[in-house]
Image: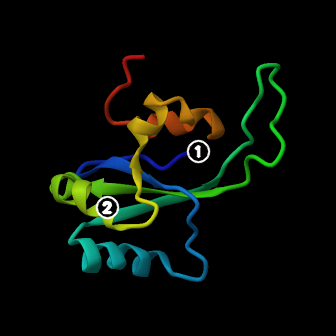
Amino acid sequence: MRQQIERPYSQVAVWTGTTLGDTPIKQFEAWFKDNFDTRIKFLETIVTAPDLNANGYPVKDTGGRHDIFFAVHEDDIEKFAPKRFQLESPPRWIEDIYGNGGGKIYPEDVQNYKSWGNEE
């Protein structure tokens, strides 16, 4: 079961190919505050499923990537949006991932993290 997204942490971002490693969650959250002046809440790390070919079979050498999901404080979204591009692999809004067909590599209920674009 996914964590409940609650205001004021309402916008979910996905940092693909990233793990916490030995970093404690509180330290990870503080890093965003210190480096981007952005308050976040860590949600979870999800290991991606493989891509599927046209016949529905897994594509070799896909899947198994670790992606970090975190929620951004609604008062910090506007300033974080451009600042995130300072990172080599910038976090993406979950709605952008689903809007571009990338949500298929996550469990179905991950789409409940979307805060907009749910009318599909």
| Along the line of sight, the residue nearer the viewer: 47 or 57 | 57
Residue in the picture at 80% in, 37% down: 59
- On the rendered structure, is 19 left or right of 83? right
- On the rendered structure, is 16 left or right of 72? right
- Amino acid bearing label 1: Met
The residue where tag 1 is placed is 1
Q: Quadrant of residue 1?
A: top right
Say if 110 sits above or below 30 in the image. above
x, y percentage for residue 104? Answer: 62, 32
CA separation in Å, label 1 and label 2? 28 Å
Residue in the picture at 23% in, 56% down: 82
Which numbered disc, 1 or 2, marks the residue that appears first in the sequence? 1
| Along the line of sight, the residue nearer the viewer: 111 or 34 | 34
- Amino acid bearing label 2: Arg
Say if 120 sits above or below 95 in the image. above
The residue where tag 2 is placed is 84
Residue in the picture at 44% in, 66% down: 88
Q: Residues within 10 Å of mark 1 (few under 14, many from 20)?
A: few
Say if 14 sits above or below 113 in the image. below
x, y percentage for residue 27? Answer: 41, 81
Helix, strand, or loop for circle 1? loop
Q: Which-is-in-front pick, marks 1 and 2?
A: 2
- On the rendered structure, is 62 left or right of 42? right
x, y percentage for residue 78? Answer: 17, 52
